[in-house]
Image: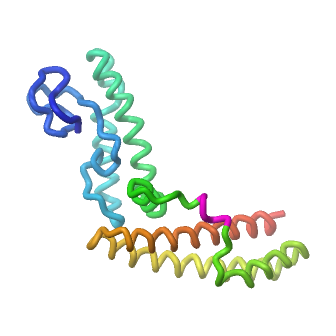
Amino acid sequence: MSTGHCWSCEKPAEHNLFCKFCDTLQRPATDYYRFFDLPKKLVIDAAELQKRFYSLSKLLHPDRYTRRPQTERDYSLEATAILNDGYRVLRDPIKRAEYILSEAGFENAEQRTKDIPPEMLEEVFELNMALEESDKSQLGEFERRFEAMQGELDVELTALYQKWDKVQDKQTLAEVRGVLNKRKYISNLLNTIHGNLSD
């Protein structure tokens, strides 16, 4: 996965994690898809990702490198951190989309979820009234409505993920970003409701 030449034998490294000539560990790629050797897609095979994670976990474990040169020991620690972070992100459909959006230069969802989606103004106003009155039966109704909305948005996201995997254009990513912003907003509302219902 490094560029140029192997740090140990100086032969061409060819972007591999291990040198094919001397089998030493190379500097790991920081791009999660490249690290796991997966195509950059929003819909991925979860079983394949898990299989690669377990396989790489064994290959990269720092205990395997205690008697190796310092460079390899350092790369093992670096690779293990990327492996764990990458797996946590890529196995989650929402985090995976956020990652691709971030790589493409889109702002993260936290910067946009303060704005109430215009079509939800009335419902948010009604929810705030129910919160003020601590009306648990009404809050339960809002919980069901927002969970249903979230389910609909997840269906919409799945379709957009499949579309982006085919065309990989900025316009589709912008649509993904819009749905994710709305989903994040609804998720925050649900967290508020759950907090009030558990009091």
Q: Quadrant of residue 129?
A: bottom right
* Image quadrant occupied by the C terminus: bottom right
Q: Determine the main secondary structure of the stretch shown in magenta.
A: loop
- Establish if 1 lies above or below 156: above
Task: Work out which quarter of the rendered image holds the N terminus and state it.
Answer: top left
Outermost residue to the right: 133
Relative to the observer, which residue lies in front, 60 or 28? Answer: 28
In the image, is residue 181 above or below residue 18?
A: below
85 or 105: nearer the viewer: 105
**Up-down: is 81 above or below 118?**
above
User: Residue 128 sits in which quadrant?
Assistant: bottom right
Q: What colouring method underlies this structural image?
A: rainbow
45 sits left or right of 139 in the view? left
Depth check, front residue: 13 or 178: 178
Q: Position of residue 52 (x, y in %)?
A: 29, 48
Magenta region, residue range: 110-114
Residue drawn at point x = 9 percent, y = 27 percent: 11
Q: Name the side, left or right, on which 193 lies relative to 35.
A: right
Residue at left offset 60%, top offset 81%: 148
50 is within the stretch colored magenta: no
Query: Picture coordinates of residue 73 (x, y %)?
Result: 33, 22
Q: What residue do we see at 29% from left, 48% from top?
A: 36
Q: Is residue 45 above or below residue 34?
A: below
Query: Along the horizontal axis of the image, is 132 left or right of 164?
Result: right
174 displayed left or right of 13: right
